[in-house]
């Protein structure tokens, strides 16, 4: 069962839009959707961080599911590491994400192919890099590809104030906290995901929603978008 996930990006003077397509011949399998959606200010997100609990509050994956999730969905805790250990990496300990980041550009037909290696995620290079001080950085990953689940399979399950860590291409670490989870129609993503100036934000994106049959195959209707704000 093949699943092709593409980002079709059209940028205009007033902003941009992004269509994330998950096409395959047979209906794709159902994928986890956010158990709740929310949006909060940067101050509220920082305040929501656990302050007195030494352990990360992780999602609960039933034991009987662990083997069936495949090799790319972590089910074990993310190891604690010190600054400078990684180059281009994303960690979300509460949903067991520990993935390398690969820069992904936009082709002549406005399509961005995500990494075929499901243990990695892609960083859209038409917006801001991780080392930027303003604007948006967009990182996207597969939910399913060729029948295997990807590193961001449980993205929609992150909670308010959840910790996110990124390392840029020079090994510099940035800490973030989750301030929002939303489910958007693929053709209705907000312009701020593509902002090259303004408030600093990290957007994490994967497929979700219902399935739509098209002339080219089956399509996921929506995108799961997680917003994170930097911790100074």
Image (spheres, rainbow, N blue to C red):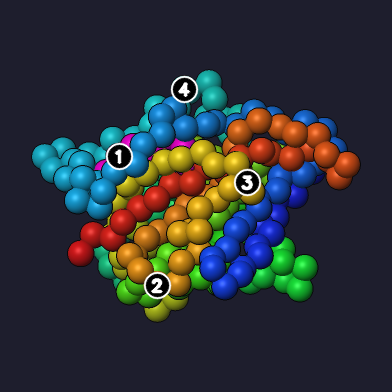
Q: Residue at x 72, y 66 (%)?
A: 110
Pinpoint residue 95: horizontal percent, then vertical percent: 41, 40
Name the N-terminal-most of marks 2 and 4.
4
* Number of marks present in the image shown: 4
Q: Is residue 62 above or below residue 4?
A: above
Q: In the rendered image, which residue does mark 4 sit on?
A: 62
Q: In the rendered image, which residue does mark 3 sit on?
A: 186
- Measure how far apart labels 2 and 4 are at the Cα level: 42 Å
Q: Residue at x 47, y 32 (%)?
A: 34
Q: In the rendered image, which residue does mark 2 sit on?
A: 197
Q: Which residues are magenta?
A: 155-161
Residue 29 occupies which quadrant of the picture? top right
Q: For marks 3 and 1, give the one nearer the viewer.
A: 3
- Measure how far apart labels 2 and 3 are at the Cα level: 23 Å
Is disc 3 in contact with disc 1, using a CB cutoff of under 8 Å? no
Q: Residues within 10 Å of mark 4 (few under 14, many from 20)?
A: few
Residue 195: which disc? none
């Amino acid at each position: 069962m093949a699943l092709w996930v593409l980002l079709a990006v059209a940028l205009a003077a007033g902003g941009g839009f992004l269509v994330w397509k998950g096409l395959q011949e047979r209906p794709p399998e159902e994928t986890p959707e956010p158990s709740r959606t929310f949006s909060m200010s940067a101050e509220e997100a920082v305040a929501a961080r656990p302050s007195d609990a030494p352990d990360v509050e992780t999602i609960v994956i039933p034991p009987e599911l662990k083997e069936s999730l495949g090799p790319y969905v972590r089910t074990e805790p993310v190891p604690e590491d010190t600054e400078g250990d990684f180059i281009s990496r994303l960690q979300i300990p509460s949903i067991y994400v520990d993935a390398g980041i690969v820069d992904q550009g936009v082709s002549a037909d406005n399509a961005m192919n995500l990494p075929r290696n499901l243990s990695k995620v892609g960083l859209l290079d038409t917006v801001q890099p991780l080392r930027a001080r303003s604007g948006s950085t967009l990182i996207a990953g597969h939910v399913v590809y060729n029948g295997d689940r990807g590193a961001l399979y449980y993205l929609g399950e992150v909670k308010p104030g959840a910790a996110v860590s990124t390392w840029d291409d020079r090994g510099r670490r940035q800490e973030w906290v989750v301030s929002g989870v939303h489910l958007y129609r693929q053709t209705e993503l907000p312009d701020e995901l593509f902002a090259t100036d303004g408030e600093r934000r990290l957007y994490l994106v994967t497929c979700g929603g219902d399935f739509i049959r098209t002339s080219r195959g089956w399509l996921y209707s929506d995108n799961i978008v997680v917003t994170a704000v930097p911790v100074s």
